[in-house]
């Protein structure tokens, strides 16, 4: 029996397939088998595979298009190795990949999967940059950034015990597996780049919206399976001042035909993960508008807590105290939903709650990934924050909070700090993160909202 099974699922990747297969054949480690599964290709894949048909270690399977997650499970059933790893058909391995990764699993019986750093390459195989991951246990404890779905070596026994891959997901198989995996087994990573990840127009990972949607489904499925209907109580607070720091009477100011506050309230009401929703304001007209919605509790915000630039923590504690006295209500966590990000949707609210429950975080914030190149001012002028423009390290990655969602366990909220020590995040797209903090952004938000309503027909 081979120690390692590598499998390559391919659909119309004949252009890159030879390089992927050759990278396995040329490994320094030779105790492997390779399964290539042609998932209904219509290009020259069949011709490419004929060149490898006689290789004693390579098994070739052709099937009608079944999709990635189904193909993953087919490969799992066919595999004979103790360890298993997927290699995507447009990527390729360093010659030492199998040697290094299998050695970790051989010498660390406590580890269930291991993954390396990697190079990003363009269509021609030229290196674009290097993805270095934080070292588990030393540089990172919150495991909310998963291993890459491909080129991660896993003990086959662990995969079988987990029941394989979820075939209902169209993509993000690695993310879904990671959620189930880290609750039962130990992951490990090596800070050596051992594969080449190709970026091109057909890359599934280029479709950010599809990725985030699939991850939302994976999280929802995981939380439903783990908690059922016993979701802890989550309180949403929508804090509104009559006098905004940027726009007068912003809450009731119309945007795409509806008051600005309407969008936050209506999206909050679309999820049943929020146990209670409170609008708190110093303005009676705003409170009256809020009372017109079902399930909304309106609480008057004292004038001393409504001054411009006043901190939010006293308002949160005021609401908690009022609910505790009136209803003996004590939520597990509190979510702040500011009205100035009207393109936030209920799925973002659910993602934040799911992320907190899955990763046992104290707090969750919504962010946008920031890929800009930044400088700081020094004695000699501007100096770049990153050492090399082309080197993108996970440890140097920047995330910009967008103000859409803040969620914290009630026990983690302090007198002068809403966020706890262990902070997770959800990623939102830039177009979802528009924040109305100026008349110009108000115009942008309204145009985006009108476009969204036109596209969805709502």
Image (tube, rainbow, N blue to C red):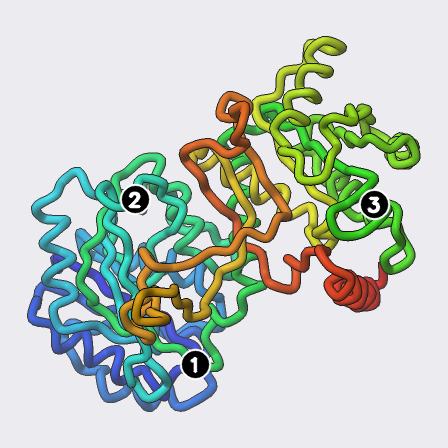
181 lies left or right of 275:
left
Q: Which class describes the residues within 10 Å of circle 2: few (<14), some (14-19), or many (20+)? A: few
Query: Considering the image in quadrants, where does the N terminus appear?
Result: bottom left
- Residue 152: image x %, image y %? 27, 58
35 lies left or right of 295:
left
Q: What residue is at 28 percent from the left and 80 percent from the top?
A: 127
Asked which secondary structure carries label 3, the reply is loop
The residue indicated by pointer 1 is 200
**Discs 1/3, front:** 3
- Residue 281: image x %, image y %? 80, 32
Q: Is residue 155 visible?
A: no
Asked which secondary structure carries label 2, the reply is loop
7 lies left or right of 292:
left
Asked which secondary structure carries label 1, the reply is loop
57 over 417 or under it: above or below = below
Decide which of 300, 30 is in the foreground and name it.
Answer: 300
**Discs 2/1, front:** 2
**Mark 2–mark 1 distance (CA, rounded to whole Å):** 30 Å
The residue indicated by pointer 2 is 140
- Residue 426: image x %, image y %? 52, 49
Of the residues under marks 1 and 3, which one precedes in the sequence? 1
């Amino acid at each position: 029996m081979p120690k390692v099974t590598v499998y390559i699922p391919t659909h119309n990747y004949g252009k890159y397939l030879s390089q992927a297969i050759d990278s396995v054949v040329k490994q320094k480690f030779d105790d492997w088998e390779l399964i290539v599964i042609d998932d209904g290709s219509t290009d020259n894949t069949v011709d490419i595979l004929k060149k490898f048909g006689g290789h004693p270690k390579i098994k070739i399977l052709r099937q009608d298009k079944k999709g990635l997650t189904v193909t993953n499970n087919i490969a799992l059933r066919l595999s004979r190795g103790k360890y298993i790893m997927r290699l995507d058909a447009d990527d390729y391995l360093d010659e030492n990949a199998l040697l290094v990764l299998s050695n970790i699993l051989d010498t660390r019986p406590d580890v269930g999967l291991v993954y390396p750093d990697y190079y990003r390459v363009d269509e021609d195989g030229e290196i674009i940059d290097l993805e270095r991951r934080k070292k588990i246990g030393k540089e990172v404890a919150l495991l909310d950034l998963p291993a890459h779905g491909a080129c991660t070596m896993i003990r086959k026994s662990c995969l079988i015990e987990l029941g394989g891959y979820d075939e209902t997901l169209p993509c993000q198989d690695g993310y879904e597996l990671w959620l189930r995996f880290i609750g039962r087994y130990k992951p490990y990573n090596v800070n050596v780049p051992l594969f080449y990840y190709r970026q091109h127009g057909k890359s599934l990972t280029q479709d950010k919206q599809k990725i985030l949607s699939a991850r939302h489904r994976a999280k929802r499925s995981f939380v439903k399976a783990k908690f059922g209907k016993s979701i802890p109580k989550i309180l949403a607070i929508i804090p509104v001042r009559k006098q905004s720091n940027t726009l007068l009477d912003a809450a009731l100011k119309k945007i795409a035909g509806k008051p600005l506050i309407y969008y936050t309230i209506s999206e909050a009401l679309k999820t049943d993960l929020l146990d209670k929703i409170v609008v708190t304001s110093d303005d009676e007209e705003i409170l009256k508008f809020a009372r017109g919605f079902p399930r909304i509790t309106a609480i008057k915000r004292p004038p001393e807590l409504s001054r411009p630039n006043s901190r939010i923590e006293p308002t949160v504690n005021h609401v908690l105290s009022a609910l505790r006295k009136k209803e003996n209500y004590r939520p597990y966590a509190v979510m702040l939903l500011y009205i100035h990000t009207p393109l936030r949707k209920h799925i973002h609210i659910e993602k934040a709650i799911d992320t907190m429950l899955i990763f046992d975080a104290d707090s969750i914030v919504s962010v946008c990934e920031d890929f800009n190149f930044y400088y700081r001012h020094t004695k000699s002028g501007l100096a770049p924050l990153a050492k090399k423009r082309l080197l993108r390290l996970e440890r140097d990655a920047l995330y910009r909070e967008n103000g859409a969602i803040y969620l914290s366990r009630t026990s983690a909220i302090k007198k002068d700090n809403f966020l706890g020590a262990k902070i997770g995040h959800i990623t939102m797209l830039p177009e979802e993160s528009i924040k109305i903090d100026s008349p110009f952004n108000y115009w942008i938000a309204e145009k985006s909202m009108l476009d969204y309503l036109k596209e969805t027909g709502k």
